[in-house]
Amino acid sequence: MSKKILRTTPSLVNNWDSCPTRGFYTDIKQIGQSETKASSQDSREIGILVHKMLEMYYQLLQWTDDKRDVRRISSVEFGRKKSVELSLSSTDVETAIRTFNDYVAFYGDEDIQPLEVEQPFSKVLFETDSHIILMEGKKDLKAVLQGNTWIIDHKTTGSKRFLSPISNQFFAYAWASEVRTVVINSIGTQKTVEPKDRFRRLFVSFTEEQIQEWYGNTVKSILDWIGYIETGHYLMRLTSCQSKFGLCQFHPICSSPPEDRERVIAMDYVHRPPHDPFED
Ligand code: SF4
């Protein structure tokens, strides 16, 4: 019998770990609220645009001899073209471009040699008698910086916040690439904050024991998902229903009696075709 393939990513692991019922609604049933665009969505798209310009900037550094300012200008031009696809306001586009220009000025002519830019990966995490589980993702940048090889992840933020290095994303990158060192490249988009407080880097090295610990947790978690999917019974993790950003988008469903949920879903949510997570 051929095995089924289950593709996972660090963000899927986050989603299912935070609440299996949420994982079911977002990744299998594929429903979501039809709300007007929230401000958090705008800041996410500013971040995407900054990422696009950084991608071009580091690709030009990897493949050309262009001077820093030529790379910067080409990257901004690329960003302006990409901004059309992102439906950002002109103010948000200028915020992204200002942030990118400030970043390039702040890091100046630092000695960094890109090895891989936006390189996707897909690696077998584990197999069972019936399934092959893949971990997939895309690393922002792998580069030699300060004499060492690092996986560098750009994190744009509109406020000063502490980023935890022990995340599924960073562990997955370290596990998949066999580079055990990660740089969290924090990029603040604020206008009035000093560059030294907006551009910060956290250098993290994982030990083999830490990687193995993450691996064991992740395998256990994914085996639990497979059990939920196969039985059709999804745990409701009630401690995840509320966060500092408000209520989970599926709260109206979960707070309804079970017999009324399909009606709530039909009336208040947008639907895409259901997704079968198992591929042949
Ligand atoms: S409302 Fe709570 S139980 Fe329901 S999907 Fe969201 S986090 Fe899970």
Image (cartoon, rainbow, N blue to C red):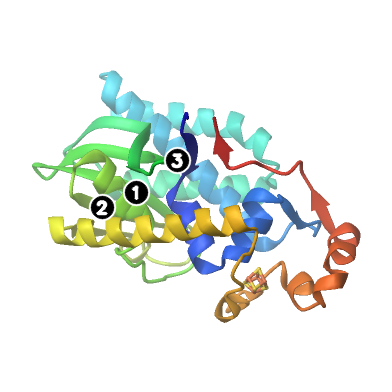
Viewed as shown, does residue 191 lie left or right of 256?
Answer: left
Q: Mark 1 and mark 3 in contact (Cβ < 8 Å)?
A: no
Residue at image mark 1: 153
| Residue 183 badge | 2
Classify 10 Å Cα crowding around label 1: few (below 14), some (14-19), many (20 and above). Answer: many
Amino acid type, callout 3 = Ser
Give the vertical position of 3 relative to 48 (above or below). Answer: above
The residue at the point 22 percent across, 56 percent down is: 211
Q: Position of residue 108 (x, y in %)?
A: 26, 43
Quarter holding residue 176:
top left
Number of on-image labels: 3
Dot 1 falls on a residue whose secondary structure is: strand
Earlier residue among tags 3 and 1: 3
Amino acid type, callout 2 = Val
| Residue 130 badge | 3
Q: Mark 1 and mark 2 in contact (Cβ < 8 Å)?
A: yes
Amino acid type, callout 1 = Asp
The residue at the point 57 percent across, 75 percent down is: 237
